[in-house]
Image (cartoon, helix red, strand yellow):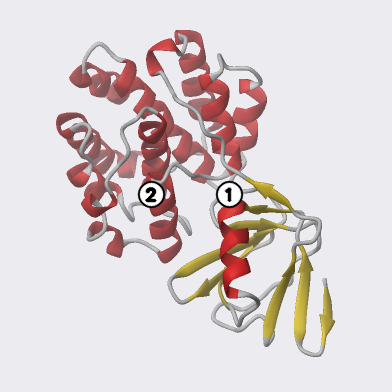
Amino acid sequence: MYHERGMRTVQIRSIHAWLADNLQQTGSTLLHVHSSCEKAVTFRQGTHLLVLTTDHDGPATAVTSESLLRLVPSNAFGEVISLLLSSAERWIPPIFDLHPSSISEEALDQLQGSIWESGRSALLQRRFLPWVTDAVRALVSEFPRVRRGGATLIGLGPGLTPAGDDFLCGFFHVLYHSGLKVDWAELESSAQGTSWIGKEMLWWACEGVVARPFEDVLHSLSLGAPQLSENLQTALTVGHSSGADHLLGLWFGLLLLQGPGRQEAAEEFRAR
């Protein structure tokens, strides 16, 4: 990462293809820091999201191998930020059809076991279970609509992306690849009650795009579960509880779609 006359230039290793196309249209611009942590800096330009990270590909994300500056939220990142894309690979989220009935019981058990054994899910904490139970009932009864269940979970729990949002992102991603795309209009008003990043991630999940570790897990399941153990372990390391809560929503979505009946699926969820 280097500086030229007030410009900070960052060499990008890989970039979400959508973001690369958008940057080509807008060029370099003044970006304001929304939040920062060890592995990522999130910028806000108007209503747009840009995540600069050293970790993994994802929605509106650019990945660099260079060290990130620890920046103060709401401060500008220099006068201008320039992302050097000359050698960047374009990350295109996998396109595939998911057939939940073809996913083996062993793979589902492995997915469920990894979530519970990790002990990382915030939503499985006792204090959140009343809301989670109500949301599950609503998701079951409304299926495939998500208005009431989404309203219960959006913004629930800790995290820069609240745990309830993480769950819904996993659930929406499963529905998308199963041919049941969630209508953002069902959620837009409720989404005003969560964090800005949470809202952005929910929108992207409705469009079938989530962070690469979660894409890898679901794609692996769609292909008969190759490298599932490795992909699950990587996904569980995302955030503090985000990985486990996202996988919880993914697992519930598969359970709901694969089960003999939606009510039975909900009962099984609550019993585990």
Q: Position of residue 105 (x, y in %)?
A: 45, 9
Residue 13: quarter of image: bottom right
Tag 1 residue: 58
Q: Residue furthest bottom?
A: 5
Q: Is residue 98 left or right of residue 90?
A: left
x, y (%) of residue 40?
65, 61
Residue at figure coordinates x 65%, y 46% from the top left: 91
Residue depicted at x 59% and y 60%: 21
Could you tell me which quadrant the C terminus lies in? top left
Residue 187 in picture, x, y percent from top left: 25, 53
Q: Is residue 227 above or below residue 124?
A: above
Q: Which residue is mark 2?
A: 165
| Quadrant occupied by the N terminus | bottom right
Q: Residue at x 50, y 22 (%)?
A: 111
Instruction: Determine the CA span between mark 1 and mark 2.
Output: 16 Å
Q: Is residue 217 visible?
A: yes
**Of the pair 192 and 96, the residue shown nearer to us:** 96
Q: Secondary structure at mark 2?
A: helix
Vertical placement of residue 95 versus 184, above or below = above
Identity, as a three-letter code, of the amino acid under mark 2: Asp
Q: Is residue 246 left or right of residue 92?
A: left
Determine crowd level at label 2: few under 14, some 14-19, many 20+ residues with C-alpha closer than 10 A.
many
What secondary structure is found at the residue carrying circle 1?
loop
Q: How many marks?
A: 2
Counting residues from the start of the chain, the first of labels 1 and 2 encountered is 1
Q: Amino acid at mark 1?
A: Gly
In the rendered structure, find residue 49 and report the number of the disc placed on it. none
Circle 1: is it few (<14), some (14-19), or many (20+) Cα within 10 Å?
A: many
Q: Name the quadrant containing residue 190.
A: bottom left
